[in-house]
Image (spheres, helix red, strand yellow):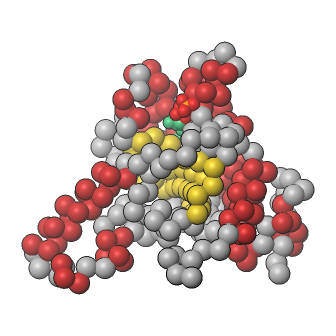
Amino acid sequence: MLKLFKNWFGNNRKPARLSLPEIELDKVPAHVAIIMDGNGRWAQQRGLPRVAGHHSGMKNVKKITMAANDIGVKVLTMYAFSTENWKRPKEEVEFLMKLPQEFFPLEIEELIQNNVRIRMTGWKEGLPDYTLNAIEGAIERTKHNTGLILNFALNYGGRKEIITGVQHLIQDVQEGKINPDELSETQISSYMLTSDLPDPDLLIRTSGEQRLSNFLLWQLAYSELWFTDAYWPEFTEDLFNQAIAEYQRRGRRYGGV
Ligand code: FPP
C-alpha cells in the first residue's frame, strides 16, 4: 500500500503535518470541492470587520491548494462567490471582487512552480473587469500546466447552471441533435459548466453549516460530504488531511450494495 511517506521523498516537498502517513496515496479523491464558509464569523469573533475574514480566507486558499497538490488531488474546486452573494452589502461584494487581483500577483509564481492550472466555473457576465482580468490572466498564464486544477467557482450557482443547461438541451432537441427518449446522465453532464471535469468525490464544508448552498447540485449526487466546525480562515492542512483520511475509510456504493 502506497503511503504518503513515499511521496515526501518522491516530490521533495516537506509534509505539512506528521499525521499525513495515514493517507493512502492510491485512494486519493480525484476531485475535492470546498465550501469555504465562516469568514464573517471568524472575523466577528475577533472584533474585526467581516471583510478581514475574507482576506484571511483568501490567504488560506494557497495553503490548502498545496496540501491537495501534495497528495495528488487532480481537481480542487473552491466556492469563492455564489450567484446569491450579490445580495450582500455593496462594500463586501466589492471587497470580494477585488480579492483575485490581490491573490494572483501574490501567489501565481508558486502556483506555476507547482504546475497548478487555474480555471473558473461560473458566469463572466456581471463580474467587474478587474476581477475578470485577474482571473483570466491567471488562466492564460497557467493554461499549459498539467498538474492540479485549481478551479474557482465564481459567480456560480447550481440551479442557474441547471436552467442554462436545460435551455441548451431543449435547443439541441429542437434542432434534432438529441433524442429526448434516449437522454442519459452523461449527456446531461455535458451541458454543465464542469463538463470536462470529473464529479467531486468529496465535498468539504467549513464553519459547522451542513448544507449545499446551491453548489454543484448535479455534480455532487454521489459525493462524500465532510463537515468541520472550523471556520475557513482557521482550516488547516491537518484538517484537510483528516477529511481525506475519513473519505478513504468510507465505502462508496453509488446506490449498490
Ligand atoms: C463565506 O463565508 C465565504 C465567502 C462568500 C467568500 C469566500 C472567498 C474566499 C475565502 C476567498 C477566495 C479567494 C479568491 C482568490 C477568489 P461567509 O462570509 O458566509 O461567513 P459567515 O457565514 O461566517 O458570515
Ligand 1 visible in quadrant? top right
Name the foreground residue: 63 vs 129.
63
Where residue 154 sits: x, y (%)? 44, 45
At x 55%, y 46%, the residue is: 210
Dividing the picture into quadrants, the one containing residue 86 is top left
Name the foreground residue: 209 vs 129.
209
On screen, residue 237 versus residue 106, left or right, reads right
Image position of 137 with respect to 31: above or below? above
Image position of 193 with respect to 173: above or below? above
Q: Is residue 201 visible?
A: yes
Image position of 101 with respect to 75: above or below? above
Where residue 184 sits: x, y (%)? 31, 79
At x 59%, y 48%, the residue is: 205
Dividing the picture into quadrants, the one containing residue 187 is bottom left
At x 75%, y 57%, the residue is: 241
Which residue is situated farthest in the front direction here? 257
Q: Is residue 105 visible?
A: no
Name the foreground residue: 1 vs 14.
1
Q: Quadrant of the C terminus?
A: bottom right
Which residue is situated farthest in the top direction here? 47
On screen, residue 64 versus residue 160, left or right, reads right
Where residue 18 sits: x, y (%)? 90, 56
On screen, residue 99 versus residue 228, left or right, reads left
